[in-house]
Amino acid sequence: MFKIIAAVLITLYFAFQLFLSILKYKNRNAPIPEEVADVYEKDTYLKWKQYSAEKIRIDIISSCVEYVLVMVLLLTNLFAILTRSIDNPYVSAIVILSIYLLATAITGIPTSYIDTIKIEGKYGFNKSSIKTFVVDQIKYLVLSFALTIGLTCAFIAIHQGIGDYTLLLFTALVFAFMLFINFLYPFLSKFFNKFTPLEEGELRASLTAMLEKYGYHVRDIKVMDASRRTTKSNAYFTGFGKSKTIVLYDNLIKVLSTRQITAVFAHEMGHGLHKDVFVNTLRSFFSIALFVVLGWLLVKFPQIHADFGFENISYGLAVILLIHAVLPIVSTFIGLLSSFLSRKAEYRADEQAVIEGYGEELIEALKILARENFADLNPPTLVVKLSYSHPTLVQRIRHIKEKEAN
Ligand SMILES: [Zn+2]
């Protein structure tokens, strides 16, 4: 019974993703709004259509591969058969999760290779050598092993020790861990990239002035060597409280003017003023609490595990069911609400740039970044509603112009 429910949930989610991909594929040919008509040259737009078609196709292939793999692993009771002679819950979970992680990593390599090296390379985005690609894959695998197995073992220890109180303690623990990772992020990212301080000059002075105006003490402004992997651009803040490190992709400095980068900063200041990071953290706390409740439910009913051939509760199985059968469906609904709130916060942050007198520069910057990132100018409404943390370029431009007119 539970096996059928799991299979139905996994299949439903897979079919829904497929439906969204087809929607995106069809929507590529819809006419683009005039506000963004100048983002791409005609030839470039044709190239974008081809690029996005290839991306959607590889996405579909990779979700098919994952779907088949997970269905086979679960429906054949393979995990129970392989761990029949193991009594220790930790060893059993580690064996199951290792098989699962290795199988998904190995089956994911071909599509990931085609995506990052072939497709991104064909359109001139990829800068990773094969060596960087292989090393990255290994690093990600090591990290996901450490994270998944570490968290699962912590859950087992707590669940075996205090039973139902796991809900409280594990939620607190995961949340603390998440804050810790956030705190560690600057160090973790050094694992993948190099960071150098932004050189003294007009840009540094302009950004520092903006930050000081809002009472932020900047620990440092750093430039990340993103161009080692990609030609795409981005910028972000790390660190807590008023002491922040700002990271700029080296690509960003190449494509935007000082005023445009300052406009992007005014937007980031808007997030700071409205405590968006804090609200986000609160939101993730509630999601984590909900996920822990779901995980706890999965180990509450031995019948679930019996359906997959286990004699006892299998924590490894619970994790895989959580990742593939429960979370995708639940996250889709959470995503509707949280991406709505996040888009609202983005509009508010854009308004800050308008208040600072950088509205036009922000529009220019957003257009350049959209072009540099080969962004979708006209995504299907349903996809935006479900998953876009930012409004679309057209929506943002309209909103900025509206605010400027007031
Ligand atoms: Zn933002």
Image (tube, helix red, strand yellow):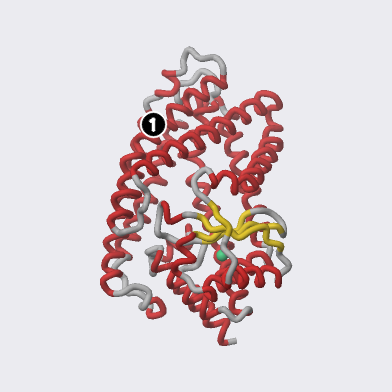
Residue under pointer 1: 103
Q: Position of residue 336 (x, y in %)?
A: 52, 58
Q: Whereabouts is ligand 1, in terms of quadrant?
A: bottom right
User: Could you classify mark 1 by the number of other residues whose Cα lies within 10 Å: few (under 14), some (14-19), or many (20 or more)?
Assistant: some
Q: Between residue 368 and residue 226, name the one nearer to us.
A: 226
Q: Is mark 1 within 8 Å of ligand 1?
A: no
Determine the image quadrant of residue 108: top left
Residue beneath the point at 37% across and 25% down: 76
In the rendered image, the residue lying farthest to the front is 200
Residue farthest toward the bottom in the current orientation of the protein: 405
Q: Nearer the viewer, residue 363 or 393?
A: 363
What is the quadrant of the N terminus in the image? top left
Q: Residue at x 65, y 28 (%)?
A: 159
Q: Is residue 379 visible?
A: no
Tell me, yes or no, if residue 257 can be seen here: yes
Q: What amino acid is at disc 1? A: Ala
- In this rendering, is residue 119 above or below 85? below
Up the image or down, 265 lies above or below 4; here it is below
State the image coordinates of residue 391 (x, y, percent, origin top left). 50, 67
Q: Secondary structure at mark 1?
A: helix
Residue in the picture at 56% in, 87% down: 405
Return the residue nearer the eye: 95 or 236.
Answer: 236
Residue in front for this viewpoint, 181 or 160: 181
Image quadrant of residue 165?
top right
Residue 401 in the image, given as x and y percentages of width and height: 52, 82
Q: Quadrant of residue 49?
A: bottom left
Residue 74 relative to residue 302: left or right: left
x and y, in percent, of residue 312 in the image: 54, 19
- Identify the residue shown where x is 68% and y is 62%: 275
Using the image, determine if residue 320 lies above or below residue 213: above
The C terminus sits in image quarter: bottom right
**Is residue 68 rendered to the left or right of residue 182?**
left
